[in-house]
Amino acid sequence: MLNRQLIEAPRTVNVKGLCSRTPGSAMPRPAGVASPRLFLPLALACTIGVACLVRAEVFTGSLDVASQPTVVIPLTLTKDGSLSLEITVGPYLNLNANAAVGVNHGVIVYDSTGTNQLYGAVQGQDSTVTHVVQGLGAGSYSVRLTAIGSFHSLGWGPYTMITSETPDPLPNDAEPNDDFDRALTASLGAEVTGHLGYYGGGGGTATDLQDWCRLTLPHAGNLELEVGLSKLLNLNVNASIGADNGIVVFDSDAATVLFGAVQGQNSTNTHVVTRLKPGLYYLRLAKIDNAGYYGSYSVTPRLVPAPEDPEPNDQVSDGGWTALGAMIEGNLGFRGGGAGLTLDQSDWWQFTMPSTGQVQLVVTTYGNLNLNSNSAVGASEGIGIFEATSAGDVGARRYGAVQGQGTTQTHAVNLGAGHYFLRLAKHGSDSYWGTYSATFNYVGAPIINSPALAQGLAGQPFTYAITALGGGEFEAQGLPPGLSLDPITGVISGTLGQPGTYEVTLLATNADGSASTRLTLAILPPPTLSIRAAPGQQVVLSWPEDYAAFALLRSSAADGSAVWEPVQPAPTPVGASLVVTNAIGTAPGFYRLTLEAGL
C-alpha cells in the first residue's frame, strides 16, 4: 500500500462509469456497484492564492454485511493532485477488514486496474473522517467501502461520501514525455511546467519518474536554466532509470552528457551550462528514487549569447573570409549542438593582401581562452598564418605564435600580395576555452578602398569620404565646381552644380608609397516623382530607374515636424521606371526620394 501523508485542500473528482446527468437527477446502477445517490454540487468559498474546491460529488448508500457488504465506486481525477474522501457512517456501520470479501481495510483506493491498492484505512462507526490520498496522477480510480466482517452488529447502516480533488498548483506536462524521442519542445525565455512522481491513474503503481524537453539554441553561448520545485519534489539520482543527476543536459544525440546537477525540494535555482554551440539539445529532469518526493516543477531556459562565429569553420576548406582593416570574432572550446560532439578546437579564416605590406594582427582573448599547441588538430602554435596554394590548400607557414588567456597582443607579419589563411587554435587542455576578437590592421603603401561610384542631386549638399588602408594624405583631381577636399580626413564636400558625369582621380600618399584610383561621380537632375491614384484606396508612385540608389520616404507632414519613414514594399522595375503601390490611408501623405533613407 502506498500512502503519502500530505494534507491539501480538496477539489472536484468526476465519477467514471456513471451516466452524465443534471444535478439531482437519478443515476443508473452499474453492475456490481451499490446505488450511490448524487446530490447537488457544493459551492465553497475561494481565497486568492489557495487551492479551492469548486464542486464536490456526494454519494450515499447503505451496506449490510449479510447481503451487501461492499461497494465499489469508480472515480476519475482530471489532473494530478490529491484525492479527498469525506466519509460519514451511521451508528451501526464500521468500515473495516472483512475476510469474506478479501479485504483488510474498510476504505480502499485502487488505481485504474482495480487491483493495485494505493490507500487503505479503517473507520469506526458513527463518525466522519476525511481520508486524503496524495500524489495521484490524472486518470481512473475506484474507491471500495466494506462493512466490518467480524462484528455483524456493526456491519450495517448508511454512509455518505463526498469526493473531491486538489490539483497540483502548476499545469501538467503533455504526457507522454518520458523519453527523448517524445520530448516536449521548449523555447528560450518561455516557462515550461510539469509534474513528476504522481502514481496510479494509468494502470500500475509506477510513478512518472522523468520528463524530457528539447531545446534549440540559435547562437553559441551559455544556457541558463531557472528551475523551481514544489515543496516535495526533489530532482536527484534515480537508479531505476539510470539517472546519475536530477537535471541533465544532453547533446543532440540525447546520450552525451554536457551538464548534470541535483536540486532539493521547495527551491528555485539557476543552473548555467557553459560554452554551447548553436544547435539541438535535450534536457532531462528526474525525481529522486523515493516515493515520498513528488510534485511540480517549472523551467525557464535563457541564453547568454557569445560572439557570432561563422561555424562550421573548423577546416581550412570552410574558412570564413575577412578583409584588411576588419575585425573578426569567434569562439573556441565550445561544444555540442549537433555540429560535432567534440569541442571546437580551431577556427580558420582567409584574407587577401592586395599588395606587399605588413599585417598587424591585434588579437584579444577573453575568459579562459589560451591560444597554444593542440595535437588534436596538429597545431604547434595557437596563431598561424599560412600561404594559400593555387589550388586553395594550405601552403608555407609564414607566421606562428602563442597567446595566453585574457590578453591583447599585436602580431606583426610582413606579407606579399596574395591569398592567405589564418588559423586560431585553442590550448589542448579542456579547461582553456572562451571567445576571441582579431583586427587586421594594414601597414604599407596606401590601398584606396572607398567606393568607385557615387551619385548626387544637382543643387544639393554632397559628401564623400576617401578611405585607404595604410592611411596617409589625400588628393582629388578633376572635382566638379562646388566641391572641395580635406586632404587630412579625405572628405569631399560641398554643393553639387550642373548635372553631368565626372571622372575624378583619387590619390593617397604615406611614408611607404602612394596609390591612385578613379571615382565616377554622377550629378543627376532632381528626379521626377509621379503620383497617381489607383482603385482600392491606393496610390501608385514611379520614378526613373536611374535613381535606383534613392529611397522613397513617406511622412504625414511636410514641415519641420515631419518624420520620414521608408515606404514598403520595395519598388518594382517596370520598363525604364521603378514603381511602388502604397495604401492611401486616412492621414495626409507626403513622399520624397532621398539617397539617405531615414532622414
Image (tube, rainbow, N blue to C red):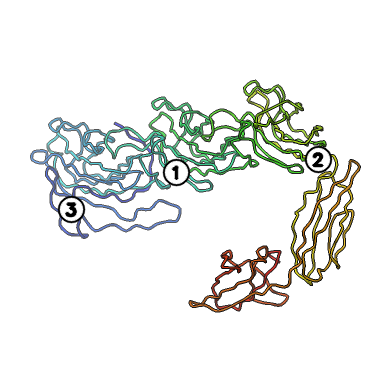
Q: Nearer the viewer, residue 422 or 452?
A: 452
Residue flagged by tag 2: what amino acid is it?
A: Tyr
Displayed quadrant of residue 563? bottom right
Residue flagged by tag 1: what amino acid is it?
A: Thr
Query: Can you give x and y, in whole percent of width and height, for residue 529 in the image?
Result: 64, 74
Residue flagged by tag 3: what amino acid is it?
A: Cys
Query: Can you give x and y, in whole percent of width and height, for residue 575 in the image?
Result: 57, 68
Question: Residue at label 3?
Answer: 19
The tag earlier along the polypeptide, 3 or 1, is 3
Disc 1: CA contacts within 10 A as few (<14), some (14-19) or many (>=20): few
Question: Residue at label 2?
Answer: 442
Left or right position of 239 against 311: left
Left or right position of 194 against 394: left
Query: Can you give x and y, in whole percent of width and height, for residue 228 in the image?
Result: 50, 42
Q: Quadrant of the N terminus?
A: top left
Residue found at x 75% / y 40%: 439
The tag earlier along the polypeptide, 2 or 3, is 3
Tag nearer the camera, 2 or 3: 2
Name the element at disc 1: strand
Question: Residue at label 1?
Answer: 185
Name the element at disc 2: strand
